[in-house]
Amino acid sequence: MNLSEIGNKAQVSTSSLESQFNCRPLRGHCVYFIGIGGIGMSAVARILIHEGCIVAGSDLRTSSLTSTLEEMGAKITTKQDGSFMSSETDMVVVSASISEDNPDLKTARKLGIKVVKYSQILGSLMKEKRGIAISGTHGKTTTSAMISTILKTAGLDPTFVIGGEVPDIGGNAHLGKGNLFVAEACEYDRSFLNLTPQVGVITNIEEDHLDYYENIEKIINAFGDFASSISKDGLLVVNNHDNNIAVAVKRAHCKVETYSLDNSSDWYGEVLSGGSGIKRFRVFKKDRFFDEFSLKIPGSHNVLNALAATAVCTSIGVDKDSIKMALASFHGANRRFQIVGVRSGIVVIDDYAHHPTEIRVTLRAARELYPEKKIWCIFQPHQYSRTRHLLKEFAMSFQNANKVILADIFAARDNDYEKTAMNAMKLYEETRNAGVDIQYIPQLCDIVNVLSSNVKPGDIVLTMGAGDVWKVAYDLVSRF
């Protein structure tokens, strides 16, 4: 039975998809996504379209993701007032950010339409294949993209759902003919616990999503639940130098393999050089030389991601030559140190970094790549709650930037209390007190104007954040 067998009213119950959702075959039937423009939601929507579903949905913002879905035949509206949802809809899929007072969701409830979370439908899709789930506070998207690229290079044609656009392999989703399913596993709302993978990865565990988890202990506990969800005959690949992972992994019932940049781990990497943007490194397995690899994307953190991907793909049976070839040609995912343009000697880069650790390692990678250049960091904080909880950590994360321009906070899932308790000026003052040359310019359009007048040939401009700060990078390249 294939992935098309999802629906609203059961006819048979032999498929895991049918039994979980009590539903009939969906080929030719309608699935409505509330928040269809989200990176994960759009990925699942793409897979269902390829499976013959009629896909519709709503999102408050248009984007390249919604445009792609419309080109594939999806009907999408920017209104979420319930008016676009047909009574013929078989199932409604909601993202974790959709609240019960959303008019579209209220309409679905009123019409008696089956409503499922994105993570639930992702979990059911994974049950049809051999699941590979990549979790962690940072590095999930790049590691998922690396694994998917390697598997595709090896001719295994995996299905994948990734939290970022990966141009080299066709975007953020693909319905493959092979028996492997690669999914980026998000910890927010404990979503990753809806997955039942045979292979798992934990890249790191840090404080994040504190609007949901409250403290690091609850985050570690959730990752412990994830570790215990890996099938007993499966494999869990983990970063060996993360104390929080060491606690979570005690809950695992499967084989565990570790990775790091020293010889204390099952898999370890020895970085040889990083000149000209190419990272060369040797890989060892159980203290025995495995092979020498190279990466086009900068940063030691990406060598760690490559080690995790190598461990996973080797366990599946991929040969080292395919791994080596795939990593050498890997250009990364969009918004992960993505060079948007080079104009008059000015390099404009865009990155998704929105957590202090991500900012720090991304700026460190930029400094390694451009040691003598002036680096402008344009940062748009994401979430008032995240900014409040991690204020001091944010302030200390910009040390490798010569000049920081701070935009207003991009709101996401924030309540009125959070918007009152925190503002960008507090982050500005904290960062300035840490000795950073920082300027507060609330609006993105004004930032573009300031950059156009002040950036010099040879400078590096790096936009960072999970909101719409990427517009600065593209507008600036257009100006130049």
Image (cartoon, grey):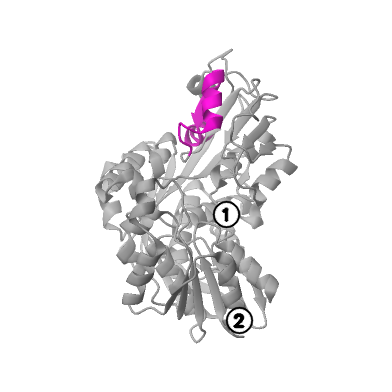
Q: Look at the image and tell me whether residue 20 can be seen.
A: yes
Is 460 on the left-hand or right-hand side of 418?
Answer: right
- Observer-nearest of 322 and 240: 240
**Nearer the observer, disc 1 or disc 2?**
2
> What quarter of the picture does the N terminus occupy?
top right
The residue that mark 2 highlights is: 453
User: Hey, what amino acid is under mark 2?
Assistant: Ser
Which mark identifies residue 123?
none
- Observer-nearest of 434 and 371: 434
Q: Position of residue 50 (x, y in %)?
A: 69, 36
Q: Look at the image and tell me whether residue 296 can be seen.
A: no
Question: Does 77 lie within the magenta span?
Answer: no
- Within 10 Å of disc 1 (Cα), the crowding (few <14, some 14-19, many 20+) is many
- Observer-nearest of 364 and 227: 364
Identify which residue is drawn at 64% across, 48% down: 62
Q: Is residue 423 above or below residue 228?
A: below
